[in-house]
Image (cartoon, rainbow, N blue to C red):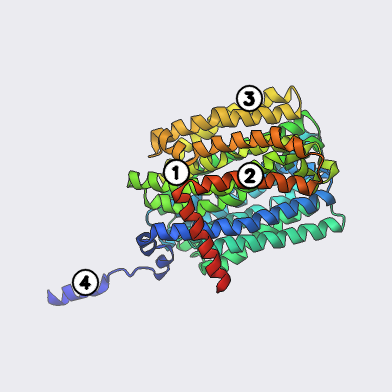
């Protein structure tokens, strides 16, 4: 009996934990969640300034090397690329960030599933080249679709590594890797454009950047998945269900974002598509470079608080209000200075983009609030509700674009912006109130009031101040309008004790780093 019992205890040893699971453990981070989230937010805001400068510089250079007609060929392919990219990720990277606990084998399963989805979408996107060419009546988009499809594999891998870094708030490593990769991708595009490769320079940039991101982030993570035959894919099915709705939301979101470019290319000309895309792209720099990187702080932070509604609401208001403090002044400045900005950054060939830029900039005033709500949906695991909202939003925006296009390109931009501000934003707040701790009152405290102030200021500057300085040189116009925006937001900070404290801490952090 004793011998048998001994043999039994020997043959069934206690399973040892995989040491690689420690990479995904957030226990230590949760003990200092507020402090780490604050430091990470400050770093993201600081490096976002560099990213904004990088992208504005990119626009200024590329716009002078590639005319609107050629740029439109590349822009026509982007909607398909972005939808395929959302499908290739299938929302699985978000599952890595959102789950309370996750281990190495689970993440390995998600990695290979992600890569499989990306491979399928790469083939689908390449095959869509011919239908797209027939739709646009432009055969030059065929090879563009086919070459860009290769980027999906590397984008899927880089997004997986990015989520691993974000889960434990390793924001510095994630953002620096992204910045360096994008700078090198821009360098490739500029060199190719100087060699006369036209829109192929943009295609190369779209391909090179995710390859570099994958390499840099893999080095930072020091993690590689287990081989597919060692992975239990069944354990990842819950994440696939969650990720499926996130992917569905991302697809619908991309369809909505790029629907204007598609309608412009269909109703008008490739040049019109290029103008609309570039105006939307330039106006979207502030949210792209500020809000989206901050998701690496918001989602993991809010995910850790999903079981404590009061703490969740308090953190939501804190994070979104601080993000808006950086985002909204830039958006207001772009709206007020749309004419001189287009003249300075893009040159005379793009002058028709100026009125489009004004309306697109007003649209971006909502980005802080809507992005915050999106992060709240994901942090609470409510991807199904987020998907449902996105489907309704697409229908509403498509209707607005179709109605506006009957009256010209500018009318289409106006209809798009007003629909997003006056219809889809209140709808999103209402849906969030049903499934997350965020009520309309909480949203107003975190974003709504600041957004209303920003819209009023943009209107006053664009229609009251900008006409008074039109006769000045372009740089002088930008200085005057920039000073007006800075003055108003300086007063906004001065009258808020919390904002004064945040600004003081940011300045102290910058000074400490400078002395070091």
> Which circle, 2 or 4, is nearer the viewer?
2
> Which circle, 3 or 2, is nearer the viewer?
2
Q: Crowdedness of circle 1 by 10 Å Cα count: few (<14), some, many (20+)?
A: many
Q: Are marks 2 and 1 in contact (CB under 8 Å)?
A: no
Q: Are marks 4 and 1 in contact (CB under 8 Å)?
A: no
Q: CA distance from mark 1 to mark 3?
A: 28 Å
Whichever of callouts 2 and 4 sits on the residue coming sooner in the sequence is 4
Vertical comparison of 112 with 470: above or below = below
Q: Nearer the viewer, residue 338 or 269?
A: 338
> Which circle, 3 or 4, is nearer the viewer?
3
Label 4 sits on residue? 8
Side of 3 where 385 appears, left or right:
right
Q: Nearer the viewer, residue 279 or 336?
A: 336
Q: CA distance from mark 3 to mark 4?
A: 70 Å
Q: Nearer the viewer, residue 295 or 347?
A: 347
> Which circle, 1 or 3, is nearer the viewer?
1
Question: Which disc number belongs to residue 485?
Answer: 2
Please give the name of the residue rendered at 51% of the width and 40% of the height, measured from the top-left corner: 369
Q: CA distance from mark 4 to mark 1?
A: 50 Å
Q: Crowdedness of circle 2 by 10 Å Cα count: few (<14), some, many (20+)?
A: many
Whichever of callouts 3 and 2 sits on the residue coming sooner in the sequence is 3
Question: Which disc number belongs to residue 376?
Answer: 1
Instruction: Look at the image and tell me whether residue 160 can be seen.
Output: yes
Whichever of callouts 4 and 1 sits on the residue coming sooner in the sequence is 4
Location of residue 488 in the rendering, given as x and y in whole percent from the top left corner: 59, 43
Q: Which picture quadrant has residue 401?
A: top right
Side of 16 where 77 appears, left or right:
right
Whichever of callouts 2 and 1 sits on the residue coming sooner in the sequence is 1
Side of 470 where 324 appears, left or right:
left
Label 3 sits on residue? 399
């Amino acid at each position: 009996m004793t011998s048998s019992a001994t043999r039994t205890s020997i043959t069934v040893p206690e399973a040892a934990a995989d040491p690689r699971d420690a990479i995904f453990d957030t226990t230590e981070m949760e003990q200092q969640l507020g402090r780490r989230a604050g430091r990470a937010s400050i770093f993201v805001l600081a490096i976002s300034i560099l990213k904004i400068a990088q992208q504005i510089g990119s626009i200024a250079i590329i716009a002078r090397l590639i005319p609107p007609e050629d740029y439109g060929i590349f822009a026509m392919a982007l909607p398909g690329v972005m939808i395929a990219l959302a499908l290739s990720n299938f929302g699985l990277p978000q599952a890595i960030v959102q789950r309370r606990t996750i281990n190495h084998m689970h993440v390995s399963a998600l990695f290979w599933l992600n890569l499989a989805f990306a491979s399928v979408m790469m083939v689908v996107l390449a095959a869509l080249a011919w239908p797209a060419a027939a739709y646009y009546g432009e055969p030059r988009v065929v090879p563009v679709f086919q070459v860009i499809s290769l980027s999906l594999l590397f984008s899927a891998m880089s997004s997986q590594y990015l989520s691993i870094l974000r889960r434990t708030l390793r924001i510095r490593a994630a953002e620096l890797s992204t910045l360096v990769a994008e700078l090198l991708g821009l360098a490739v595009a500029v060199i190719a454009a100087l060699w006369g490769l036209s829109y192929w320079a943009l295609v190369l940039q779209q391909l090179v950047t995710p390859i570099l991101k994958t390499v840099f982030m893999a080095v930072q993570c020091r993690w590689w998945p287990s081989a597919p035959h060692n992975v239990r894919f069944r354990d990842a099915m819950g994440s696939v269900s969650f990720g499926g709705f996130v992917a569905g939301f991302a697809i619908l979101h991309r369809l909505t974002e790029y629907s204007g470019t598609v309608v412009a290319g269909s109703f008008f000309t490739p040049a019109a598509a290029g103008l609309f895309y570039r105006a939307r792209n330039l106006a979207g720099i502030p949210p792209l470079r500020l809000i989206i990187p901050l998701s690496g702080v918001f989602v993991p932070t809010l995910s850790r608080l999903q079981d404590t509604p009061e703490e969740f609401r308090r953190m939501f208001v804190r994070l979104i209000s601080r993000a808006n403090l950086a985002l909204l002044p830039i958006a207001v400045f772009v709206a007020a200075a749309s004419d001189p900005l287009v003249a300075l950054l893009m040159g005379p060939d793009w002058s028709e983009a100026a009125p489009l830029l004004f309306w697109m900039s007003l649209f971006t005033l909502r980005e802080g609030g809507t992005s915050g709500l999106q992060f709240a949906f994901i942090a609470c695991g409510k991807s199904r509700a987020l998907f449902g909202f996105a489907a309704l939003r697409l229908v509403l925006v498509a209707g607005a674009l179709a109605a506006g296009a009957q009256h010209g390109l500018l009318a289409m931009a106006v209809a798009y912006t007003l629909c997003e501000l006056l219809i889809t934003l209140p709808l999103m707040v209402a849906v969030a109130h049903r499934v997350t701790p965020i009520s309309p009152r909480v949203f107003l405290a975190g974003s709504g009031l600041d957004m209303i102030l920003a819209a009023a200021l943009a209107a006053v500057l664009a229609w009251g101040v900008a006409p008074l300085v039109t006769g000045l040189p372009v740089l002088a116009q930008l200085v005057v309008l920039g000073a007006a925006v800075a003055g108003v937001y300086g007063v906004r900070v001065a009258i808020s004790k919390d904002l004064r404290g945040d600004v003081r801490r940011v300045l102290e952090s910058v000074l400490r780093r400078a002395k070091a």
